[in-house]
Image (tube, grey):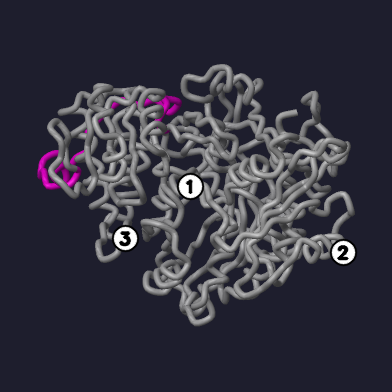
Amino acid sequence: MNENTSPTVLKAEAIAELTKPGAEFEIGVRVINGVEARFFTNIPETLQEYYKIYCDEFAELTAVVWYDDHWTFRDTYERAAIVARKLRDEMGVGKGDRVAVACRNYPEWIFAVMGITSIGAIAVAFNAWWQAEELEDGLTDSGARVLIADQERANRLGDIPKQLGVDTIIIRPDRQTPAGAVSFDDLMADPKGVDMPEVEVDPDDDVLILYTSGSTGEAKGSVSSHRGILTALFSWKLDVEVMALMVPEQPLPPGAPETPAILLNVPLFHATGCLYQFLSSLIWGRKMVMMYKWSAEEALQLIAKERITHFVSPATLDWELMEAPSFGESDLSSLLAVGGGGSPRPAPNVGRIDRVFENAAPNIGWGMTETNAIGAGVVGEDYVSRPSSTGTPHHILDLKIVDEKGNEVAAGQQGEIWVKGASVVRGYWNKPEATAETITDGWLHSGDVGYFDEEGFLYVCDRIKDMILRGGENVYCAEIESVLYDHPWVFEATVFGVPDKRLGELPAAMIVPRESRVLTEKDIQEYVATRLAKFKVPEHVWFSKEPLPRMASEKIFKRKIREEIIKTHFANLAEE
């Protein structure tokens, strides 16, 4: 390719070359969930096939690291096969049956989900933060036949699985397993069944349910097919291959390992953890180094020890990593990419990542659980020069911006982001009304406000439900948060709307100052006023000495903070 050609043309040429007939990423069109959509014609058709191909290709490489324990890709596949055999041959799990997995980040989560999804069954990922009632609701809603849970989740549930007729496999039991339950450790000790059973599976069969409630409350089971997941995984691979064609081959930076490695630093029941950190790693033979729970200091140690090349997280985590006391003394030379997703980074952090990581390029992706985590992405200089953007759409998807009536708007105009394509889920488990509200003629209503610029880069402004309507003016929380994070004394911040009798809503903020720093409401208001219009300045500011509460995805739990503030300070107005 001519290196003097514009990046836009180079990218188009690379995509055309990689997706042409007969190429690895050849694209066809077929009806999926009743709607015509583009799909990759030459990729594996099922997860069962996918596991076999890549666990064979990278058999001797390390796949999973859990502190001092290591498993190769062959080990991982064999353990998944034991789970598959146990479920099918001894527990009667068949095609379409649901098997729930409820645990923190343990290697067994990976073995279990690979086994479940290899026999035509549906893996149901439960949020490990759920309490007994929520876990029971998940079992009831999904109709799970089997529950695979760690001891903590099993303790929360007590006898509930038995009462519901659900068989239980307990991960890492710290006591004698209850009557009828099976220890996962004992399962792995069984020498039989290291070959995966042969089961006929269709690419459009249901295979995974990830529960999503975001910051809105009610949990909904988002149902993915084999094709939907594999479309996402190979879309990420296409991105990398496109970049390789666009940029002349360059040697790895000094100190960078030849074998890729990723830190599994977000929960596996979350789309980022399950799809990008876990499932996409098989394509590259990428080592997965697991964290039981997030700790910035532990993450720095693991990056140095395990020579991590990819760090991907919500924006809050790479912020904490850079703020950790030992950050400046840590060996981070192995890192090649510092990625983000889930919500836009505050713009100042993008340049900071580019400056402080020696060999790593910053990148970000926009996607949803309901799109199997793909949507748009941007990396390197494109991102640094457009730090508020989340990039250009993935080639396999269609994205558009629509107004309140569903009409597409022009570049530069804001509206709701809609997505259509093979990776979009078929809907929500047992919730036809919620599905109908979210998907129209194959178009997924994202609930995000955004716009395209003239070059086709997507900008996500805010969640529609987080947008503040102040006397007829739209106020985007993310825009104010980006300014707040640029304040040298602000450590954490979140912005939300509070009720107002005259204007309907007003912007408000909750802030954690940096250690030993004292900030006042007036300080914050004056600072924001120098950067944004007066109507965007927070009318109320509260301060916290403790870190802001997080959801399981490690995003700041804005809804909880807002509800507590309204209950404490605006109860009368909220009731009106």
| Region rendered in magenta | 184-208
> Mark 3 = which residue?
65
Around disc 2, counting alpha carbons within 10 Å, would you say few (fewer than 14), some (14 to 19), or many (20 or more)? few
Vertical order, 383 against 445 (above or below): below
Q: Earlier in the sequence, mark 1 or mark 2?
A: 2
Q: Earlier in the sequence, mark 3 or mark 1?
A: 3
**Label 3: which secondary element:** strand
* Residue 207 on the magenta span: yes
Quadrant in the rendering for residue 484: bottom right
The amino acid pointed to by label 2 is: Thr
Q: In the figure, 455 relative to 167: above or below?
A: below
Quadrant for residue 471, please give it: top right
Q: Is residue 99 above or below residue 194?
A: above
> Is residue 387 found inside the magenta-colored segment of the image?
no
In the depicted view, which residue is nearer to us: 208 or 158?
Answer: 158
In percent of width and height, residue 279 lies at: 42, 46
Tell me: 468 left or right of 238. Answer: right
Q: CA distance from mark 2 to mark 3?
A: 48 Å
Neighbourhood count class around disc 1 (C-alpha, 10 Å): few under 14, some 14–19, many 20 upward: some
Quadrant placement of the N terminus: bottom right
Rate crowding at label 3 as few (under 14), some (14 to 19) or many (20 or more) other CA atoms within 10 Å.
many
Q: Which residue is mark 1?
A: 552
User: Type of residue at label 3?
Assistant: Val
